[in-house]
Image (tube, coloured by chain):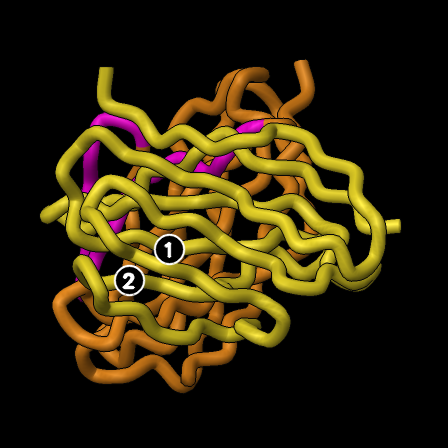
């Protein structure tokens, strides 16, 4: 089954404790993105990647890092999380027809 | 970058046609317009995409006027299961810089 998976689905952490949210797709897509979703603000793109070893900033990249060492994986890294990074995070993978397929989401709470 | 405006919420009734309009005054020449649907606790799901004029698929139609400064998503004969948030998205195809701008979403509530 074609899908995008994210782990963990829920995470509670404390300020400053590094964390990684994993994202994996099995559709051999070149393009992947990370979004955060906050009430009243819709989805905002954090980072995107057009291919392996090619990443670029989206709208709200501050406080986040990504890597794309292989095509299927695109982890999101928070080196020193802060409470304003409490949010719902989505990973997306884009087909050649430019349709984005979204993961199930990761709900993060930073205390 | 395009600034996107769409209504915060809309109500309608089962069996009606629903039209949701999105404003994107600063749309760039190579930007596409895409609409996604999102149910609670799920990721957004692709509905339809277009560049100009009219696009129709099995679930919706997308109307884009010649100036492309707005677009209208049309859902024919809605049902209760169409209750969701609908997002308008403007951006270039992935083969360019791929920075995408999303509207804040329109919460559509369908009543029996």
For residue A33, which numbered disc appears in the image?
1
User: Could you say which quadrant of the image residue A51 lies in?
Assistant: bottom left
Contact, mark 2 vs mark 1 (Cβ under 8 Å) = yes
The chain painted yellow is A
Identify the residue at horizontal 39%, vertical 42% (top origin).
Answer: B74
- Range of the magenta residues? B42-59
Q: Earlier in the sequence, mark 2 or mark 1?
A: 1
x, y (%) of residue A57? 42, 75
Quadrant of the drawing holding the N terminus of chain B? bottom left
Residue labelled with disc 2: A49
Tell me if A66 is positioned left or right of B80 in this view: left
Quadrant of the drawing holding the C terminus of chain B? top right
Q: Is residue A39 visible?
A: no
For residue B24, which numbered disc appears in the image?
none
User: Could you say which quadrant of the image residue A9 lies in?
Assistant: top right
The chain painted orange is B
Between A11 and B27, the residue placed more toward the observer is A11
Tell me if A109 is positioned left or right of B17 in this view: right
Tell me the SS state at disc 2: strand
x, y (%) of residue B66? 22, 75
Say few, some or many: other residues with alpha carbon within 10 Å of mark 1 (under 14 / 14 to 19 / 20 or more). Answer: many
Chain of the residue displaying label 2: A
Between A81 and A18, the residue placed more toward the observer is A18
Identify the residue at horizontal 43%, vertical 80% (top origin).
Answer: B2
Mark 2 and mark 1: Cα distance apart in space: 6 Å
Between B6 and A85, the residue placed more toward the observer is A85
x, y (%) of residue B51? 19, 64
Identify the residue at horizontal 83%, vertical 58% (top origin).
Answer: A15
Identify the residue at horizontal 59%, vertical 52% (top origin).
Answer: B105
């Amino acid at each position: 089954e074609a899908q995008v998976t994210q782990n963990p689905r829920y995470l509670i952490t404390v300020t400053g404790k590094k964390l990684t949210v994993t994202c994996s797709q099995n559709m051999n897509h070149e393009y992947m993105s990370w979004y955060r979703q906050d009430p009243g603000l819709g989805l905002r793109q954090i980072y995107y990647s057009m291919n392996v070893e090619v990443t670029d900033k989206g709208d709200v990249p501050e406080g986040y890092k990504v890597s794309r060492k292989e095509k299927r994986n695109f982890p999101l890294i928070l080196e020193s999380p802060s409470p304003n990074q409490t949010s719902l995070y989505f990973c997306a993978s884009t087909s050649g027809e430019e349709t984005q397929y979204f993961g199930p989401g990761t709900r993060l709470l930073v205390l | 970058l395009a600034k996107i405006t769409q209504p915060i919420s809309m109500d309608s009734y089962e069996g009606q046609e629903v039209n949701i309009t999105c404003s994107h005054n600063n749309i760039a020449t190579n930007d596409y317009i895409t609409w996604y649907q999102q149910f609670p606790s799920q990721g957004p799901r692709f509905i339809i995409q277009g560049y100009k004029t009219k696009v129709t698929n099995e679930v919706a139609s997308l109307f884009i006027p010649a100036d492309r400064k707005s677009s209208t998503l049309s859902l024919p004969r809605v049902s209760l299961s169409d209750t969701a948030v609908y997002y308008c998205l403007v951006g270039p195809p992935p083969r360019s810089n791929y920075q995408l701008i999303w509207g804040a979403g329109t919460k559509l509530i369908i009543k029996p």
